[in-house]
Protein backbone atom coordinates (compact mmCIF):
# COMPACT_ATOMS: atom_id res chain seq x y z
CA UNK A 1 0.00 0.00 0.00
CA UNK A 2 1.48 3.29 -1.10
CA UNK A 3 -0.51 6.38 -0.16
CA UNK A 4 -0.06 10.11 -0.61
CA UNK A 5 -1.78 12.28 2.00
CA UNK A 6 -2.68 15.72 0.69
CA UNK A 7 -4.19 18.64 2.55
CA UNK A 8 -3.55 21.99 4.19
CA UNK A 9 -1.46 22.36 7.34
CA UNK A 10 -3.52 21.39 10.38
CA UNK A 11 -5.78 19.01 8.43
CA UNK A 12 -4.69 16.07 10.58
CA UNK A 13 -2.68 14.29 7.88
CA UNK A 14 0.18 13.55 10.23
CA UNK A 15 -2.03 12.18 13.02
CA UNK A 16 -3.93 9.96 10.62
CA UNK A 17 -0.82 8.87 8.75
CA UNK A 18 0.76 7.80 12.04
CA UNK A 19 -2.24 5.59 12.86
CA UNK A 20 -2.62 4.01 9.45
CA UNK A 21 1.14 3.41 9.26
CA UNK A 22 1.00 1.61 12.63
CA UNK A 23 -1.98 -0.48 11.59
CA UNK A 24 -0.33 -1.55 8.37
CA UNK A 25 3.24 -1.67 9.65
CA UNK A 26 4.54 0.57 6.92
CA UNK A 27 6.69 3.71 7.28
CA UNK A 28 5.05 7.10 7.73
CA UNK A 29 7.24 9.50 5.78
CA UNK A 30 6.68 13.11 6.79
CA UNK A 31 9.00 15.62 5.16
CA UNK A 32 8.06 18.15 7.86
CA UNK A 33 9.09 15.70 10.62
CA UNK A 34 12.35 14.85 8.87
CA UNK A 35 13.13 18.56 8.49
CA UNK A 36 12.27 19.38 12.13
CA UNK A 37 14.49 16.53 13.27
CA UNK A 38 17.34 17.76 11.07
CA UNK A 39 16.89 21.31 12.39
CA UNK A 40 16.91 20.14 16.03
CA UNK A 41 20.12 18.20 15.37
CA UNK A 42 21.68 21.03 13.37
CA UNK A 43 22.61 18.74 10.51
CA UNK A 44 23.65 20.28 7.16
CA UNK A 45 20.08 19.66 5.91
CA UNK A 46 18.65 21.28 9.04
CA UNK A 47 20.86 24.33 8.70
CA UNK A 48 19.71 24.81 5.11
CA UNK A 49 16.02 24.30 5.94
CA UNK A 50 15.67 26.26 9.18
CA UNK A 51 14.98 29.75 7.85
CA UNK A 52 12.31 28.47 5.45
CA UNK A 53 10.52 26.33 8.03
CA UNK A 54 10.61 29.13 10.63
CA UNK A 55 9.05 31.54 8.12
CA UNK A 56 6.38 29.09 6.93
CA UNK A 57 7.86 29.02 3.43
CA UNK A 58 8.49 25.90 1.40
CA UNK A 59 12.09 24.73 1.49
CA UNK A 60 13.62 24.37 -1.98
CA UNK A 61 12.31 21.59 -4.20
CA UNK A 62 15.77 20.15 -4.65
CA UNK A 63 16.23 19.77 -0.91
CA UNK A 64 12.98 17.85 -0.31
CA UNK A 65 13.24 15.86 -3.54
CA UNK A 66 16.71 14.63 -2.53
CA UNK A 67 15.42 13.87 0.92
CA UNK A 68 12.47 11.84 -0.42
CA UNK A 69 14.63 10.07 -2.94
CA UNK A 70 16.96 8.93 -0.21
CA UNK A 71 14.11 7.93 2.10
CA UNK A 72 12.20 5.93 -0.53
CA UNK A 73 15.40 4.12 -1.42
CA UNK A 74 15.57 2.57 2.06
CA UNK A 75 14.72 -1.07 2.61
CA UNK A 76 11.69 -0.58 4.89
CA UNK A 77 9.70 1.01 2.05
CA UNK A 78 9.33 -2.26 0.14
CA UNK A 79 6.03 -3.16 1.83
CA UNK A 80 4.56 0.29 1.25
CA UNK A 81 4.57 3.78 2.70
CA UNK A 82 2.52 6.86 3.46
CA UNK A 83 3.80 10.19 2.21
CA UNK A 84 2.68 13.09 4.40
CA UNK A 85 3.56 16.62 3.33
CA UNK A 86 5.14 15.63 0.02
CA UNK A 87 4.54 16.53 -2.76
CA UNK A 88 3.62 20.13 -1.99
CA UNK A 89 3.94 21.68 -5.45
CA UNK A 90 3.47 20.63 -9.04
CA UNK A 91 7.19 20.39 -9.63
CA UNK A 92 7.50 18.10 -6.61
CA UNK A 93 4.63 15.97 -7.97
CA UNK A 94 6.41 15.57 -11.30
CA UNK A 95 9.65 14.72 -9.54
CA UNK A 96 7.79 12.11 -7.48
CA UNK A 97 6.30 10.56 -10.64
CA UNK A 98 9.76 10.24 -12.06
CA UNK A 99 11.20 8.81 -8.87
CA UNK A 100 8.43 6.24 -8.39
CA UNK A 101 8.79 5.17 -12.00
CA UNK A 102 12.47 4.50 -11.43
CA UNK A 103 11.72 2.62 -8.23
CA UNK A 104 8.85 0.73 -9.92
CA UNK A 105 6.64 1.68 -6.99
CA UNK A 106 3.48 3.35 -8.29
CA UNK A 107 1.31 5.01 -5.64
CA UNK A 108 -1.99 3.29 -4.83
CA UNK A 109 -4.08 6.37 -4.07
CA UNK A 110 -4.00 10.03 -3.10
CA UNK A 111 -6.15 11.05 -0.13
CA UNK A 112 -7.13 14.68 0.24
CA UNK A 113 -8.15 15.95 3.68
CA UNK A 114 -10.71 18.71 3.16
CA UNK A 115 -10.82 20.91 6.22
CA UNK A 116 -12.27 24.37 6.90
CA UNK A 117 -9.84 27.20 7.51
CA UNK A 118 -11.39 27.92 10.90
CA UNK A 119 -10.64 24.39 12.11
CA UNK A 120 -7.15 24.43 10.59
CA UNK A 121 -6.20 27.58 12.47
CA UNK A 122 -7.72 26.32 15.72
CA UNK A 123 -5.85 23.01 15.50
CA UNK A 124 -2.54 24.64 14.71
CA UNK A 125 -2.84 27.12 17.57
CA UNK A 126 -3.68 24.28 19.95
CA UNK A 127 -0.80 22.16 18.68
CA UNK A 128 1.64 24.95 19.45
CA UNK A 129 4.60 23.83 17.37
CA UNK A 130 7.34 26.42 16.94
CA UNK A 131 6.03 27.32 13.48
CA UNK A 132 2.44 27.41 14.76
CA UNK A 133 2.31 31.11 15.59
CA UNK A 134 -0.27 33.36 13.97
CA UNK A 135 1.99 35.04 11.42
CA UNK A 136 3.52 31.77 10.22
CA UNK A 137 0.17 30.00 10.16
CA UNK A 138 -1.23 32.69 7.89
CA UNK A 139 1.78 32.40 5.60
CA UNK A 140 1.57 28.59 5.47
CA UNK A 141 -2.10 28.71 4.53
CA UNK A 142 -1.32 31.16 1.73
CA UNK A 143 1.56 29.03 0.47
CA UNK A 144 -0.76 26.02 0.59
CA UNK A 145 -3.35 27.82 -1.57
CA UNK A 146 -0.78 28.99 -4.09
CA UNK A 147 1.50 25.98 -4.39
CA UNK A 148 -0.18 22.87 -3.00
CA UNK A 149 -3.91 23.23 -3.70
CA UNK A 150 -3.36 22.82 -7.50
CA UNK A 151 -2.31 19.24 -6.76
CA UNK A 152 -5.93 18.37 -5.97
CA UNK A 153 -6.89 18.88 -9.62
CA UNK A 154 -3.66 17.33 -10.80
CA UNK A 155 -4.43 14.01 -9.08
CA UNK A 156 -8.18 14.29 -9.66
CA UNK A 157 -7.56 14.35 -13.40
CA UNK A 158 -5.70 11.08 -13.07
CA UNK A 159 -8.71 9.56 -11.33
CA UNK A 160 -6.80 8.55 -8.23
CA UNK A 161 -7.95 11.10 -5.66
CA UNK A 162 -10.16 10.27 -2.68
CA UNK A 163 -11.73 13.09 -0.69
CA UNK A 164 -11.96 12.77 3.09
CA UNK A 165 -13.77 15.19 5.38
CA UNK A 166 -11.03 16.29 7.73
CA UNK A 167 -13.26 18.39 9.98
CA UNK A 168 -14.45 15.60 12.25
CA UNK A 169 -12.69 14.21 15.33
CA UNK A 170 -9.54 12.09 15.06
CA UNK A 171 -11.56 8.91 15.74
CA UNK A 172 -14.24 9.63 13.17
CA UNK A 173 -11.76 10.64 10.48
CA UNK A 174 -9.76 7.50 11.22
CA UNK A 175 -12.81 5.29 10.74
CA UNK A 176 -13.79 6.93 7.46
CA UNK A 177 -10.20 6.80 6.25
CA UNK A 178 -9.82 3.11 7.14
CA UNK A 179 -13.01 2.39 5.18
CA UNK A 180 -11.72 4.31 2.18
CA UNK A 181 -8.41 2.47 2.27
CA UNK A 182 -10.16 -0.91 2.43
CA UNK A 183 -12.18 0.09 -0.63
CA UNK A 184 -9.09 1.18 -2.51
CA UNK A 185 -7.35 -2.09 -1.74
CA UNK A 186 -10.28 -4.25 -2.72
CA UNK A 187 -10.54 -2.74 -6.22
P1 LIG B 1 4.62 20.10 7.86
O1 LIG B 1 5.05 19.38 9.09
O2 LIG B 1 4.25 19.15 6.75
O3 LIG B 1 3.54 21.11 8.15
O4 LIG B 1 5.89 20.92 7.33
C1 LIG B 1 6.49 21.92 8.12
C2 LIG B 1 7.37 22.81 7.26
O5 LIG B 1 8.39 22.02 6.63
C3 LIG B 1 6.66 23.50 6.10
O6 LIG B 1 6.04 24.70 6.50
C4 LIG B 1 7.83 23.75 5.14
O7 LIG B 1 8.62 24.82 5.56
C5 LIG B 1 8.65 22.48 5.30
N1 LIG B 1 8.24 21.42 4.36
C6 LIG B 1 7.69 20.21 4.67
N2 LIG B 1 7.44 19.48 3.57
C7 LIG B 1 7.83 20.24 2.52
C8 LIG B 1 7.82 20.05 1.11
N3 LIG B 1 7.34 18.94 0.54
N4 LIG B 1 8.30 21.06 0.34
C9 LIG B 1 8.79 22.19 0.87
N5 LIG B 1 8.81 22.43 2.20
C10 LIG B 1 8.34 21.48 3.03
Image: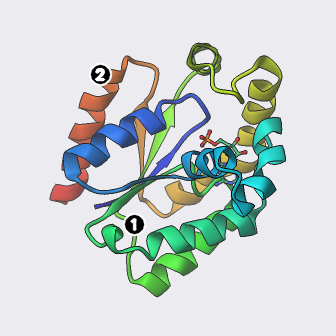
Q: Residues within 10 Å of mark 2 (few under 14, many from 20)?
A: few
Q: Is residue 185 left or right of residue 173?
A: left
Report the front residue among 36 and 183: 36
The residue positioned 69% from the left and 58% from the top of the image is 43
Residue 163, placed above or below residue 24? above
Judge: label 1 CB < 8 Å from ligand 1: no
Q: Position of residue 179 (x, y in %)?
A: 21, 39
Residue that label 1 marks? 107
The residue positioned 55% from the left and 39% from the top of the image is 7
Which image quarter: residue 121? top right
Q: Is residue 38 left or right of residue 15?
A: right
- Mark 1 lies on a secondary structure that is loop
Q: Which mark is residue 182?
A: none
Q: Position of residue 155 (x, y in %)?
A: 52, 58
- Mark 2 lies on a secondary structure that is helix
Mark positioned earlier in the residue sequence (2 or 1): 1
Residue 178, placed above or below residue 29? above
> Where the C terminus falls, by quadrant?
bottom left
Q: Residues within 10 Å of mark 1 (few under 14, many from 20)?
A: some
Residue that label 2 marks? 172
Q: Is residue 14 left or right of residue 128?
A: left
Q: Position of residue 79 (x, y in %)?
A: 25, 68
**Farthest residue, direction left:** 186
**Farthest residue, direction bottom:** 102
Q: Position of residue 13 (x, y in %)?
A: 47, 37
The residue positioned 47% from the left and 77% from the top of the image is 100
Amino acid sequence: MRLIFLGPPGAGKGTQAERIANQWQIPHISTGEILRHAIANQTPLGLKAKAYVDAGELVTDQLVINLIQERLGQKDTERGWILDGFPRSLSQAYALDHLLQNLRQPYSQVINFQTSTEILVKRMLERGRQDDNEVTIRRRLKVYQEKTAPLIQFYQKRGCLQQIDGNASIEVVNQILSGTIQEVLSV
